[in-house]
Image (cartoon, rainbow, N blue to C red):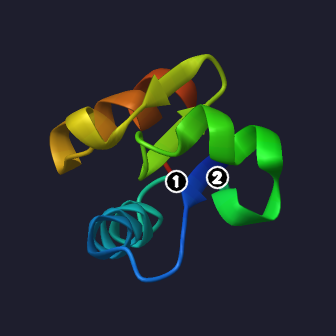
Amino acid sequence: MVKLEFYTKHNCSLCDDAYALIMMLKNYYSFELEERDIYTNDSWLEEYQLLIPAVRIKDTFLTCEKMNLKQLEKALQENIEIND
């Protein structure tokens, strides 16, 4: 199963919105969701601090600037199969 890495932090309304999109799409696509709080890892904090919410699916990486339903679904379609 493909892993979707979701870079986030607590008390982030943009992250909450992105999470809602991810959960909505989980009804149609099969993937493992791994939430990564950037404050639990110094390298994540340094790399993603200004980019969250961010999603990585294989080689596809979306930051807050491109985090919308259309772009997220496109990334999923390019990387995983639709549920039967």
User: Which numbered disc covers residue 83?
Assistant: 1
Q: Position of residue 11 (x, y in %)?
A: 42, 83
User: Which numbered disc covers residue 43?
Assistant: none
Horizontal side, residue 54 vs residue 46: left or right: left
Residue for point 31% across, 30% down: 74
- Name the residue carrying label 2: 31
Q: Position of residue 55 (x, y in %)?
A: 51, 42
Residue for point 71% across, 43% down: 44
Number of the front mark, 1 or 2: 2
Question: Which one is in front, 23 or 81?
Answer: 23
Counting every numbered tag in the picture gives 2
- Is residue 81 among what the camera can see? no
Residue for point 62% across, 32% down: 47
- Give the structural element (helix, strand or loop) at label 1: loop
Horizontal side, residue 68 vs residue 41: left or right: left
* Residue type at tag 1: Asn
Given the current orientation, which residue lies at the most extreme top position?
Answer: 59
* Residue type at tag 2: Phe
Q: Quadrant of the N terminus?
A: top right
- Is residue 38 among what the camera can see? yes
Query: For mark 2, does the 10 Å Cα neighbourhood hold few (<14), some (14 to 19), or many (20 or more) residues?
Result: many
Q: Position of residue 83 (x, y in %)?
A: 52, 53
